[in-house]
Amino acid sequence: MSTAAWVTLIVIGAYVWGGFLLLLMIAMRKEHGKRHVESGEERGLWVP
Amino acid sequence: MSGSKSYFSSRWALMVAMLSMAVGTGNIWRFPRIAATNGGGTFLIPWVIFLITWSVPLLLCEFAMGKGTRRGPIGAFAALVGERFAWMGAWVALCSIFIMFYYGVVTGWCLRYFYAAVSGELPGPSPTALWESYAGSEWAVVTLVLSIALAVLAVGRGVRGIENATQVMMPVLIVLVVVLAIRAVTLPGAERGLAFLFTPDLSGLGNSRVWLEALTQNAWDTGAGWGLALTYAVYMRQREDTTINGFMLGFGNNSVSLLAGIMVLCTVFSIRPDAATEIVGAGNTGLTFIWVPQLFAAVPGGRLFMAFFFLALFFAALTSLISMFELGARALIDRGWTRGRALTYITVAAMVAGLPSALSLPFFENQDNVWGVGLMLSGLFFGIAILKYGVDRFRKLYVNSEGSDITIGRWWNAAMFLVVLEALVLLGWWLSQTISTEGWAASLDPFRRWSLGTFLLQWGVLFVLLLAFNRRIARGQVPVSVAQEKA
């Protein structure tokens, strides 16, 4: 494979796959945060 | 169905269902072929540009309209821009329903080929033997009926049925595509396929056809502008995010396409580099149902991988078919029908209207073209509706709604103007090119399979009917609370 093909593979792969994984990570963090707020954990209201 | 059951149980259930709707045969059989015939690496550049300037803005719009109005396409357009524009929503819905009529046939083909791969019928005595004896025969009708039955089984149980079906099929589909892609890149000579897919030729970007294909591929494989994401968004919880989810759907879908491109092209260039151009130029059905069995037959352990390929294709098709049935059912539920009654009518319509496509490949190809290009009008109507409502107002009230993880800025306003511009320019370009290539007389002949005339005739009839019955279409909507109770 030529250098140009490798560069395209890395750039497109990072954009599409990397973009998706980054968005997934952000969504997981946000969801985790929402669950904490809902359960009252952030306000110290967690009940066993 | 009670209100609590009318929502996806979690964000992940929603996203799996959304991804299963977007990932269809367009990702697995169309993307590799379109990428290969439009310059490989050259095609990928406009393809990623249109992901962010067509697919993502429209997906954000669909998420926001569905969640904001809690109605399917017809009701959402009527609620947002007024009853006078309900016909636009009806166009979006009917375009997807007309696609559903022949998509059931495609789903049936995939099911039949999965069975043939498992039973050892493939690759068969000659490359075309199975395809010639099956396509267009009464067996294609049998597999159409089976596919419809499976889709109805999921949709009949409402959101929970859709959730359960997609949560099984979507992860399996992803695993199968990843396994097949890994197998493909580890075949001897696979680097030729990678080089073909990723080597750019910047001079090719001057060819308008590459840009048109990149846009239609984005419209086809992300499902942006189909009204399907809007329909599933009706069942989002109020505090659910619309912004990150919209982006994730577009990027997740295109991630699968890229894997499928690697999977197919590495296999083609490894097994038959001499016939690579002929294979990728053989059309969707030619590539998938005639060449793929031959390619896998030459791979060590090929029967297993062939079965994996057709199972992945079947799951991709079935989960998308499920979303189309839900769209049809939703449109009727919004009119106060029960889910059971709505689904009965949609099922009968799908079986009757799917028959000509099952029995005649020319008819199938005609419908595939007419309503496939019609999706560009669907995207245009979404754009027009948002501009009419007020693009900035819509962004503030609907896109950046309660529960959104990030705030979408003014760039989205510009993106929606761009969506309208893209649709108009590309439709104009398509019209002018068709007429200049074929001449007025030939291009306007309505009885040729791919003529401009057949497009204009079928679109024209639908337009006239929708405009004539617009008032009736708009006024049949019942209050959201009533439709939810009856769902």
Image: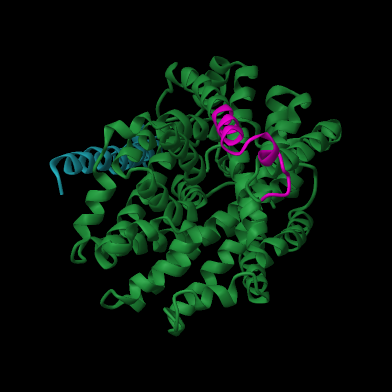
Chain colours: A cyan, B green
Overall secondary structure of the magenta section: helix
* Residue sitting nearer the eye, B186 or B80: B186
Q: Examine the image and state in which quarter residue B340 appears.
A: bottom right
B239 above or below B108? Answer: above
Percent position of residue B276, x then y:
32, 59
List the single residue furthest toward the left.
Answer: A3
Magenta-drawn segment: B427-448
| Residue sitting at x 68%, y 25% | B80
| Place of residue A15 in the rendered image (x, y in percent of width and height, measured from the top left) | 28, 37
Q: Nearer the viewer, residue B385 or B113?
A: B113
Residue B401 placement, left or right of B431: left
Residue A8 against residue B269 in the figure, above or below: above
**Is residue B149 shown above or below B93?**
below
Seen from the viewer's position, the closer of residues B474 and B407 is: B474
Horizontal relation, residue B209 to residue B335: left or right = left
For image coordinates 55% across by 54% down, the residue present is B320
Q: Is residue B441 located in the magenta-colored stretch of the structure? A: yes
Is B306 colored magenta in this rendering?
A: no
Q: As displayed, is residue B265 above or below residue A14?
A: below
Image coordinates for residue B3, horizontal then vertical, percent: 66, 46
Position of residue B185 in the picture relative to residue B447 (left or right): left
Residue B78 seen in the current view: yes
Q: Is residue A44 visible?
A: no
Does residue B220 appear to the left or right of B476 in the view shown? left
Give the residue drawn at x 42%, y 23%: B407
Residue B81 x, y percent position in the rendering:
70, 23
